[in-house]
Image: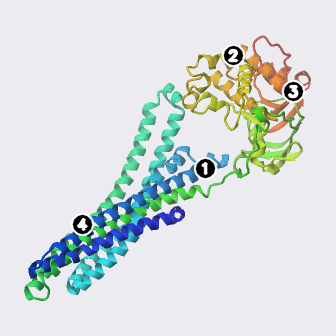
Amino acid sequence: MATFLRPHRGACLAGALLGLAGSGLALAQPLAAKRLIDTLESGRTTVAPVLVLAALLVGGALLSALGQYVLHRTAEDVVCSARRRITGRLLRLTVPELDRHEPGDLITRATSDTMLLRQAATQSAVPAVTGAVVLVLTVVLMGLLDVVLLSVTLGVVALLGAVVAAAAPSIGRATRQAQESVGEIGAALERALGAVRTVKAAGAERHETRALEQLARDARRTGVRAAGWQALSGAASAVAGQAAFLAVLGVGGVRVASGAIGVSTLVAFLLYLFALAPRISQLVDAVGQLQIGGAAAVRIGAVQHLDVEAVDDVPPRLNPAPAGKRSPRPPATVRFEDVGFRHQPWLPPVHQHVSFTVPAGGVTALVGPSGAGKTTLFSLLERFHAPQTGRIFVDDRDVRQWPLAELRAAIGYVEQDAPVLSGSLRRNLTLGIADVADDEVDDVLRRTRLEAVVARLPRGLDSLVGHRGSRLSGGERQRVAIARALLRRPRVLLLDEATSQLDADNEAALRETVAEAARDTTVLVVAHRLSTVTDADRIVVMNAGRVRAVGTHAELLETDALYRRLAATQLLTAGSTVPQDSSAR
């Protein structure tokens, strides 16, 4: 908690001082009331005491209100800072770290956990300090009025302190469990909504609903447990206040009757007691809120210990030339040298001694059975993962020596599922690129045959594409992803099954686009269609995480049996004929 409040300590101090000033005026009110009663008893004029009491009431209220405003505004600043910190870090987490955590739980830490942090900042940390100071001053003033009555009050309050001290750890544990349950709900809901069409097609709505309902019941159970402990603390506070009032009233009545103290002293003491009870309740609530805020702060702080990518360096501008005209960038060479990789030490290897070279320019196709490790090569090249053995070079420079932002700025990547972000079509096309000229966008739209799509959208490029591009077809989403990659003018273009959702006409147009791009870009494509492979300048055949053969389509048909089987089965498209290996028949 202190970590999040420290940058705002000046504002917290200002709010605390304003609150203390308001409380100080409130503490003077019982003394002013005592003076008013004494004045009435003496028969003197009461104008001055009444004006003083009124000024104390109004001044105390105004200062307290101003202090609350400053504290609430500071709490919003605390939440804003925490959210900026956590969201910025979440987007920089390494891919393996993201794979180990549920996205819904991470989202909960940036939303509901930060809300609890705001409550704790305004209802516990600063109020606990100011409340404690005012409590001490109140006790001192009560002691000046009558030590006997103060002793009675403190005896009752001590019982309350024992109850609160016993309940505080349980409140913290229950709150942490409640927040973890909320995180599990977020993770489960994100899982279901992220594949809602699959859930509906499988008729699994009831099953997923039952799972969410069970998580909701778990969250309710932990929330009720936390509420129970908080209610116990609150009840103890209320009982202590009532017991202290009755005890002071009884003992004070006896002392007034015996002449030990006057009526005005008892009235002033009771007024202080009335002021003391809310302070005690405030401290009790503050203890509970501190436990809740502490639990939230632990969950938020845990994100700071997750592995992140080193992307603090400023990415190179993709548009360095004036008027939005980007100077051409030469294609890059790519070389894999004895690369070995596995996702976890206990899992089987994905790659074993992978070595091949991709010269600058042209098209290199990666083919092989499912699970051969083709897509993972792209992840290694983008440094989403790091190989355990071997090295990967871009322009004879180890990718680990490239500044990460510069490396990724040189690479255009079209993923297999061609994700499209919620927002406008223009924002999707220019993602991560600044100052793109309109003619460049128009050129890319023409090359990827998106002109007709833009024309039918109600607001053209500024039309919203829906959640994950739901207002676009699968083929349109794929073309948008390709256009986005081409607009970056990459030195290396990675296409992972880039034509899987395109019809024959658009696929042919895309092949022309890729061939055009290959003149000044190094293109690597994972392909399962023969039409994509036959035009490649070179083909890398992979199997079981190893490079089996490298060559052209014609060469591999002659020399590699696996390639012949792939060409005759999963690579074969209508109208294509290739010789088959006798072992495949």
Marks 3/2: CA distance? 25 Å
Q: Nearer the viewer, residue 198 or 478?
A: 478
Q: Answer yes or no: do the residues labelled 2 and 1 have beta carbons within 8 Å?
A: no
Colouring: rainbow
Q: Residue at x 23, y 75 (%)?
A: 272
Nearer to us of marks 2 and 4 is 4
Q: Quadrant of the C terminus?
A: top right
Q: Is residue 347 left or right of residue 223?
A: right
Which of the two labelled residues, at mark 1 and mark 4, occupies the earlier sequence position?
Answer: 1
Marks 3/1: CA distance? 37 Å
Q: Is residue 88 above or below residue 503?
A: below
Amino acid type at circle 2 is Asp
Which of the two labelled residues, at mark 3 and mark 2, occupies the earlier sequence position?
Answer: 2
Q: Residue at x 48, y 53 (%)?
A: 114
Amino acid type at circle 1 is Gly
Q: Quadrant of residue 547?
A: top right
Residue bearing the label numbered 3 = 519
Nearer to us of marks 2 and 1 is 1
Nearer to us of marks 3 and 2 is 3
Marks 2/1: CA distance? 39 Å
Find residue 88 and name its label.
Answer: 1
Q: Nearer the viewer, residue 150 or 38?
A: 38
Marks 4/3: CA distance? 80 Å
- Could you say where residue 337 lies in the image, as x and y percent from the top left? 87, 44
Q: Answer yes or no: do the residues labelled 3 and 2 have beta carbons within 8 Å?
A: no
